[in-house]
Amino acid sequence: MNNIPTELKYTKEHEWVKAEGDIVTVGITDFAQNSLGDIVFVELPEVGQEFSKDDTFGVVESIKSASDLYLPVSGVVTEVNEELPDAPDSLNSDPYDSWMVKVKMTNQDELSDLLSNEDYESLCQE
């Protein structure tokens, strides 16, 4: 059974989102890290970069494959987890503590497009 915290929102591309006011924190889910296998490399954007919803904001590479990361909301990157590039394996051990970016949203309505934990769990079981 995948670990799917109830307080978070999710994307069909297996990112998790935690919204606090107009700031969202984004990472990859337990299902994603499990599917990827041992993560060996993470590429993240620069602070201040602006993205539209569903833009590629980075890359995660495992011993099996490389996967693009998609930003679930439009906005500007306000913070990047500087520890991840040096310790990408932390995404395997604790994907919900190992956030990737924090973004100041430009359109809060986009949050309504995200999946609840129940909907995401159903997606993972397909």
Image (cartoon, rainbow, N blue to C red):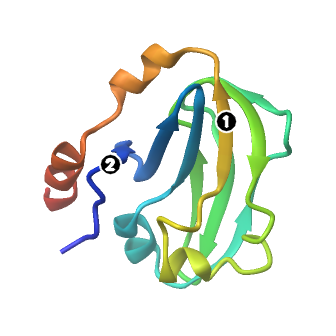
Total of numbered circles in the picture?
2
**Badge 1 density bin: few <14, some 14–19, many ≥20, Cα 10 Å:** many
**Badge 2 density bin: few <14, some 14–19, many ≥20, Cα 10 Å:** few
Image position of 54 with respect to 79: above or below? above
In the rendered structure, which amino acid carries the disc numbered 1? Answer: Val
Q: Nearer the viewer, residue 38 or 83?
A: 83
Image position of 32 with respect to 93: above or below? above
Tell me the tag on residue 7.
2
Residue 67 sits in which quadrant? bottom right
Screen quadrant of the N terminus:
bottom left
Query: Residue at the location (46% across, 50% down)?
Result: 15
Foreground tag (1 vs 2): 2
The reply to whether callout 1 and callout 2 are in contact (CB within 8 Å) is no
Query: Residue at the location (77% across, 46% down)?
Result: 79
Q: Position of residue 96 (x, y in %)?
A: 47, 65
Image position of 33 with respect to 126: above or below? below
Which element type, helix, strand or loop, lies under badge 1?
strand
Q: Nearer the viewer, residue 44 or 99?
A: 99
Q: Position of residue 13 (x, y in %)?
A: 41, 47
Query: Residue at the location (34% across, 22% down)?
Result: 112
Image position of 111 with respect to 7: above or below? above
Q: Position of residue 115 (x, y in %)?
A: 28, 38
Q: Of callouts 1 and 2, which one flags the residue occurring earlier in the amino acid sequence?
A: 2
Q: For the residues marked 1 and 2, what is the alpha-carbon distance in whole angstroms?
A: 18 Å
In the rendered structure, which amino acid carries the disc numbered 2? Answer: Glu
Tell me the tag on residue 82.
none
Screen quadrant of the C terminus:
bottom left
| Residue 65 shown left or right of residue 31 in the figure | right
Name the residue carrying label 1.
103
